[in-house]
Every structure is written in C-alpha cells, then in structure tokens.
Image (tube, rainbow, N blue to C red):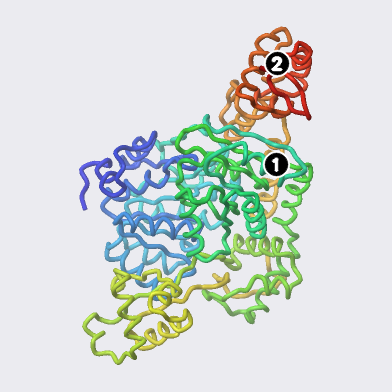
C-alpha cells in the first residue's frame, strides 16, 4: 500500500491524530536515508519511529531484537494493526520457519523480526541476500556495546549486513544509554558520515523519586500504598514474593494480583486486564511485568527489591505517570540491600571452571554425545537439572547465559510459548477426510473461531477450546494430535519448559573458553552499575539529578520533589517565622482532625523536631491540646 505521508500511515494503522515529540523528526531522518540513533525513554514511542518508515519503504524491514517475548509481542501488535509481520527464533518449528522464509521471499510481509544469533547462520544469510531489504533496525541497541548492561556478542554480526544492502539505512533504538554506550553503538554499526542522533531528555518532572529506608519493608509498603491513591506496581525479585506480598495486601483490604513469568498466558492476560481496567489496584510483579504495558494512570511504582542497575530502575520507575500527572517512584531500602546487591555480582559471574562444568553437566543431562547436537533443540527442565547438578538456580542460569553469549549453546526460557495450529490441507480436501465425530467437532470450532488458519500459524488455547466444547483439555490435545497425523493441520503443542539450542557440536569441557569481553569486561561493567545504583539508593544527592547525571545530562537545578530535596526544604524552615507555622498547624487540624506529631509533620512536609517548640507554645496558650499522643485543635 502507498501512503501519502507518515502521518497518514500513523492515522490509518494506529489511529493517532499526531506524532509524539521527536517521533516525526526521527522518521524524517530515516526516510531521508540517514543512519539514525534514537534514544527514547520507556513510554516514548520507540517502535512507531521505525514501523512507520518501514511501511513507507518499498521493501522489507529487518528488526534485530534480543528477546523472544518482545519479538512476539511486536509481531502480534503489528498484525493487530493489519500490518503483515513475522519473526524468526530458535523456538519455531521447521514448518513455521519455512513459512516465514517463504513470506519474506515473496514480499508478503513488511517486517521480519530476528534474533541476533540468526545472523550467524550462513544458510540464512544466503537466503537473506536475495531479498529486497529497505531498512535495518537494531532494537535494544545497547546490547551491541560492551559498555551496555546486556552485551550480546552476536549483535556484532549486524554490521556485516551493510555490505549486502549498502543503500538501506540502519536505525538503532534503545530506551536507556549512557554517552559511552551511545558512541559505541554508532561505531560498532559502522554509521555513515552524516548520521543523525536523537535523544529525548531522561527527565520525568512529574515523577517524584523517593527512597524510604526501613528494616520493616512490609509495614512501610502498606504505609506508602495507604498514603497514595490510584493504580500501583510493586516490583520484587522472586516469583514466590509476588504471591506472598499480593496475598498480604489482600488480607488488609488492598486489591492486588501477582504476576511473574511462570504464569500461563491466559492467567497473565486476565490479571493484566483486571489491573488495566481498575478492578485491581496493585500489581505485585517481577520484571517480567512491563513489556508492552501502556497504562497511563499508574500513580506509584514501588521497588520492594532493588534491580541491579539505574537503567533497569529508570525503565521500571518510568511506568508511573505516563499521562503527565504527578506520580511517585518509591524505593524501599533496608541496610542489608547493599550486601544483597553486591552478592548479585558473584551470582551473575560464577568462576570459569564452574561455567565449563555446567556445560558438561547440561550435555550429560540431555544425553548429548561429544561431536553431536549441531542445530538441535532439546527440552531442558531447569529445576530438575539444578537438583541433579546440586546448583543454586540463579547461579546455574547465569552460567547458561554466559555460555549463550559465548556461542556454545543457547538457553531459552519462553514461558509465553503458545500452542499453535495451521491448516495444511486444501480447503476442499477437508470435506473428503475421514474424521471421527470428535475430530470434526474440534475442526469446525477451529475454522469458525480462528481466522487465518490457512495462511499462517495461529495461537490457540486448548483449555478454552475444551471449555466451549465441553471436553477435557487432554481430549482436545489428543484430538489435535490426531488431526495433525491425518495431515489436516499442523499442531505445535505449548512448550512447557525451557530449552537448549546448540548452534555448534558438543565439545569437551577443557576446550570451553570464555572471552574476556564476555566475562571480565561485563563483570566490571556490572560492578560499576551496581555501585551507581547503591549511590542512588544510599546517597544523599538529588535522586532525579543522580539519574540524569548517570545518563550524561548535567544540570545544576535540583528537582525539589525527591526525598533528598524535600528533606533539605524541611531543614531550611526558619524558626523566626512561627506565625506562619502556627497557621499551617491550625489549617491541618481543621474540621476536628486528630493527628499524632509524626502525622502532622508529614502533612506539613516537615521534620517532627522542627515543629515541637511551636506545638509546645500553642499547647501552653490553649490553642491546641495533646491527648493520648494525639493533637487536636480547640474550638
């Protein structure tokens, strides 16, 4: 389809009247053929900046992204807006991958999402060279930089695409990058002279950054939620905590849900929708919650557990106040958190010997012989493996991730992997097939309720089908397998557990070498990021400025809204203006309100000790009274 302007494409597919700040400038640069770096904070609308140009260019847009979940979310979102798209990742069946290849080759899709590892496959590159590629997009571009917080060596292969498509501009987008990372991105992608760089300010002036230091986090959490209103997110670091904290909130009358990567897709969607609709106030979640969340009226984001970097903290805190209204980002910090953060470094980077040992044990666990495994996928029960290997799950996962970065295997956790179906026979052949009554019932249901089955794989849910047809989920599963055996459909059951993909054959443990860039450099960078986060949580500088300075924005003005700035304002209250303070106290105690000294001080945004003398004076003069530790105004 031809579009008269980027704005027409935006209105037609997304229904927006106009672009957000900076989006139109970025789109114009890309359409003008310039290599472009776009630094846009969470919620800034990054995807629009490459999806609109991709629609307007004549050929295919390649989008390289590191997360399978993000890849699938983007493809589903594009299809929902009537934009043909497909993705490649190691979780696809051969039939699904072949179909995506055919669509790309025939020009039937506009966007193809790839994992960076796919660009290391020579056969795939051979196919790719024959396609009409108009734009190359690198999403989460900080992953190409050794200075970034999630370096992926496979990203370095992206620059090689330039020689195959010299006319196609390269666009790099990311939500958070320090100046060093931004410069490294441009260099590693071989940006051409005249490249453009766009950066939105990282300042979110409507967000009040607060640190609350307390050994009793559960009590402090309740206090924060009771002193604020509106939708809230509480971030924790473990799945068990999401359930534990959400239940504790419910018992005291605060509606809450738990959300983590281990939930089935139906539960995730249902809980997320209840929260979006305002039926539930608080979502207690791991960092699995947030991808694609566009709820504008989140009033408070609480970090019950701290993440491992300012980048992560900023992205998660930035989910508050997207409507521009005043909102709070509250970090609950206990003295032990400093040690906890430091311990994460050891968990993330076990010894090289340990990593090599995990490689060998993983190969034995899946019964993979030396010299075997090339281009194969194996189901991998991580819980059972940790028990067999006597390994701590967090450390085992870290070892597998480092082995992934080093290219020895690819460890993939894909909890959102849905069951998928495609009709593989001709429509007219369905009438001649010998179906049992149950098979016919399921087949008719599929055809009536899942459009597009003849053209592509469609996500299905066996439990939903079972409910509508008054069958058990297992009987639906067996029926779908039977239909697949009769070559009426191709059925891909939901993958219930992680898997290992081997891009090369198994080698001996002694030959495992972890490059310095993947281990030593990344470890040092992580230490620097943890130290920066400790400074944010335990330091006494303006919180907003600490974040801005980290991202290279230098400002001399303090925010006046974070806890540090508010404390400074309290301390500067003049003792020579008692009349003004008395008026504030009288106003706070109007209408028969009864407050403790602490509650009154919080209401006035002052420290308790700064108002004690004035309270004594007012009590002595009979203006207020103190009874049972509660202050009230005398009539």
Q: Identify the element where label 2 is drawn.
A: loop
Side (left or right) of 568 relative to 255:
right
Image side of residue 632 versus residue 376, left or right? right
Left or right: residue 562 compared with residue 167: right
In the depicted view, which residue is nearer to us: 431 or 230? 230
Query: Does the rendering let one see residue 606?
Result: yes
Spatial CA span between label 2 and label 1: 26 Å
Image x and y of residue 3, in percent: 22, 46
Residue 220's disc is: 1
Classify 10 Å Cα crowding around label 2: few (below 14), some (14-19), many (20 and above). Answer: few
2 or 1: tag closer to the N-terminus = 1
Q: How many marks?
A: 2
Quadrant showing the C terminus: top right
Residue at the farthest front position: 635
| Closer to the camera in the image, 473 or 182 | 473
Out of 514 and 171, give the one closest to the viewer: 171
Give residue 572's mark. 2
The x and y percentages for residue 380 are 61, 74
Position in image of residue 80 (x %, y %): 33, 57
Q: Is residue 98 above or below residue 332?
A: below
- In the image, what residue occupies the spot 40% across and 47% down? 47
Q: Is 511 placed above or below 205 here?
A: below
């Amino acid at each position: 389809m031809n579009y008269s302007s980027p704005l027409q494409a935006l209105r037609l597919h997304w229904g927006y009247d106009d672009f957000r700040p900076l989006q139109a400038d970025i789109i114009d640069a890309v359409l003008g053929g310039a290599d472009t770096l776009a630094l846009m904070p969470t919620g800034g609308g990054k995807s629009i900046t490459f999806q609109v140009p991709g629609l307007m260019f004549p050929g295919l847009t390649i989008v390289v992204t590191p997360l399978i979940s993000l890849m699938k979310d983007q493809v589903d979102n594009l299809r929902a807006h009537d934009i043909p798209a497909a993705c490649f990742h190691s979780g696809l069946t051969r039939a699904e991958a072949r179909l995506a290849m055919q669509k790309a080759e025939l020009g039937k899709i506009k966007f193809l999402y790839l994992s960076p590892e796919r660009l290391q496959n020579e056969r795939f590159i051979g196919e790719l060279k024959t396609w009409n590629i108009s734009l190359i997009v690198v999403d989460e571009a900080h992953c190409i930089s050794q200075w970034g917080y999630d370096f992926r060596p496979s990203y370095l292969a992206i620059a090689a695409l330039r020689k195959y498509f010299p006319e196609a501009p390269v666009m790099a987008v990311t939500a958070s990058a320090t100046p060093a990372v931004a410069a490294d991105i441009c260099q590693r992608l071989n940006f051409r002279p005249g490249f453009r760089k766009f950066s939105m300010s990282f300042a979110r002036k409507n967000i009040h950054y607060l640190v609350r230091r307390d050994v009793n986090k559960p009590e402090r959490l309740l206090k924060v939620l009771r002193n604020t209103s509106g939708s809230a997110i509480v971030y924790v670091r473990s799945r068990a905590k999401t359930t534990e904290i959400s239940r504790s909130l419910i018992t005291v009358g605060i509606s809450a849900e738990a959300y983590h990567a281990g939930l089935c897709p139906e539960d995730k969607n249902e809980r997320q929708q209840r929260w979006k609709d305002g039926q539930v106030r608080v979502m207690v979640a791991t960092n699995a919650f947030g991808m694609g969340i566009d709820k504008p009226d989140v009033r408070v984001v609480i970090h019950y557990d701290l993440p491992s970097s300012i980048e992560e903290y900023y992205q998660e805190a930035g989910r508050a106040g997207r409507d521009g209204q005043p909102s709070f980002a509250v970090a609950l910090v206990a003295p032990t958190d400093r040690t906890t953060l430091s311990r994460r470094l050891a968990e993330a980077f076990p010894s090289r010997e340990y990593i090599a040992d995990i490689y060998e044990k993983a190969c034995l666990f899946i019964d993979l012989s030396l010299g075997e495994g090339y281009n194969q996928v194996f189901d991998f029960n991580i819980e059972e493996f940790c028990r067999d290997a006597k390994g701590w799950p967090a450390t085992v996962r870290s070892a597998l991730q480092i082995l992934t970065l080093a290219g020895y295997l690819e460890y993939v956790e894909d909890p959102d992997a849905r069951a998928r179906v495609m009709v593989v026979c001709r429509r007219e052949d369905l009438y001649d097939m010998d179906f049992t009554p149950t098979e016919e019932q399921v087949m008719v249901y599929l055809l009536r309720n899942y459009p597009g089955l003849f053209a592509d794989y469609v996500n299905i849910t066996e439990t939903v089908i079972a409910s509508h047809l008054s069958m058990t989920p297992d009987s639906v599963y067996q029926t779908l397998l039977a239909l697949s055996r009769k070559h009426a459909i191709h059925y891909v059951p939901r993958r219930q557990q992680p898997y290992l993909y081997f891009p090369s054959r198994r080698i001996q443990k002694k030959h495992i070498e972890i490059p310095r860039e993947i281990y030593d450099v990344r470890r040092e960078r992580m230490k620097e990021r943890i130290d920066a986060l400790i400074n944010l949580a335990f330091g006494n500088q303006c919180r907003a400025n600490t974040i801005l300075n980290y991202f290279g924005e230098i400002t001399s003005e303090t925010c006046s809204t974070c806890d540090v700035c508010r404390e400074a304002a309290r301390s500067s209250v003049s003792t020579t203006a008692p009349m003004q303070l008395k008026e504030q106290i009288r106003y706070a105690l109007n209408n028969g309100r009864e407050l403790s000294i602490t509650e009154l001080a919080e209401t006035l945004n002052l420290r308790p000790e700064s108002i004690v003398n004035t309270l004594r004076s007012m009590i002595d003069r009979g203006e207020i009274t103190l009874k049972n530790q509660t202050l009230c105004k005398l009539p």
